Amino acid sequence: MYFTDRGIEELEKRRGEEEVSLAWVADRLKEFVDLNPDYEIPVERFATWLARLDDPDED
């Protein structure tokens, strides 16, 4: 198990039953980056990856 898996498992355990919009998630990511600017690049990469999941032109 990677260290980050613990955070993902906590998220699933605590909030896994909730339904939220992607706009809500985007707002939380922006808020996170505002509070933690060192994570701007990983958050940007994650958001881009999510946005392009169904794009057949992306590798």
Image (tube, grey):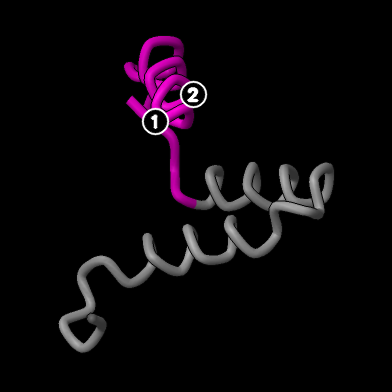
Foreground mark, 1 or 2, reads: 1
Residue ID at (38%, 19%): 9
Instruction: Give, as a three-letter code, the residue at label 2.
Output: Gly
Is 37 left or right of 56, judged from the image as shown? Answer: right
Which residue is the site of mark 1? 2
10 Å neighbourhood of mark 1: few (<14), some, or many (≥20)?
few
| Numbered mark located on residue 26 in the image | none
Sequence-wise first label, 1 or 2: 1
Where is the C terminus found, in terms of image quarters?
bottom left
Q: Is residue 52 left or right of residue 41?
A: left
Question: Is 22 drawn above or below residue 46 in the view shown?
Answer: above
As shown in the figure, which amino acid type bears the numbered disc 1?
Tyr
Which residue is pictured at 33% across the width and 16% down the height?
A: 17
What is the x, y in percent for residue 37? 81, 54
Whether label 1 touches label 2, CB < 8 Å: no
In the displayed structure, does residue 37 sit left or right of residue 7?
right
| Residue 43 figure quarter | bottom right
Between residue 35 and residue 18, name the one nearer to us. 35
Question: Which residue is tagged 2?
Answer: 7
Is residue 31 inside the magenta stretch? no
| Residue lying furthest bottom | 57
Q: Which residues are magenta?
A: 1-22
Q: Quadrant of the N terminus?
A: top left
Tell me the SS state at disc 1: loop
Label 2 element class: helix
How far, Cα to Cα, is label 1 from label 2? 10 Å
Residue 23, position as x, y percentages in the image: 53, 52
Q: How many marks?
A: 2
Question: In this view of the protein, which residue sits in the foreground, 1 or 5?
Answer: 1
Q: Nearer the viewer, residue 27 or 55?
A: 55
